[in-house]
Image (cartoon, grey):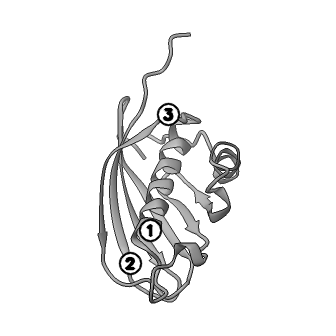
Amino acid sequence: MDGGKAVGLKMDADALNAFLAEDFAQVAPDFSVLRAQEDVLVAELRVKDAHLRPGGTVSGPSMFALADLAIYCAILSRIGKVPLAVTTNASIDFMRKPASGQNLRAECRVLKLGRNLAIADTLIFSEGVGEPVARCSMTYAIPPKSPQ
């Protein structure tokens, strides 16, 4: 819901995964959108050795990448395929250590969707850890629509 009005999705999880495979082939194998709904988007990072830091925990940059991808996809699910929407502000809180080598799940909510800016919040969970391991808030700039 946005402003009390049902928004409807322009891209579902399958469309978002296809978009990632086509436009972000370099990272698409590591991520997938599991669910896209009006109130929440859920994405997953399939953790591999490249995502780990010494000691076996998932690195901060890998958690940040999951949050960024989840928020980007949550926004695109609402506005459609707009590849040039970009992050303009980001803040992440690392709250607890993720389970060693376990996949991560991001639950993202779009808090505000305007013509030029979108603001979203994501909680990141690690398999085997009950509480969130990180929280991220981002603002995205949405490019103006081209005149038709």
Taking the image as shown, residue 88 lies to the left or right of residue 77, namely left
Residue located beneath label 2 in the image: 133
Which comes before the other along the chain, label 2 or label 3? 3
Residue lying at 41% horizontally and 63% vertically, measured from the top left = 64
Image location of residue 21, percent across then percent down = 70, 50
In the rendered image, which residue does mark 1 sit on?
A: 63
Task: Give the structural element (helix, strand or loop) at label 3.
Answer: loop
Along the line of sight, the residue nearer the viewer: 35 or 90: 90
Whole-percent x, y for residue 2 in the image: 39, 43
Tell me residue 30's x, y (percent): 63, 64
| Amino acid at pointer 1 | Met
Q: Is residue 96 left or right of residue 26?
A: left
Q: Amino acid at mark 2?
A: Val
Q: Secondary structure at mark 2?
A: loop
Mark 3 and mark 1 lie on one chain; the one further toward the N terminus is 1
Front position among marks 2 and 3: 3
Asked if 95 appears above or below 19 in the picture, the reply is: below
Which type of secondary structure does the marked residue at label 1 adopt?
helix
Does residue 29 appear left or right of residue 3 in this picture?
A: right
| Image quarter in which the C terminus is found | top right
Q: CA distance from mark 2 to mark 3?
A: 29 Å
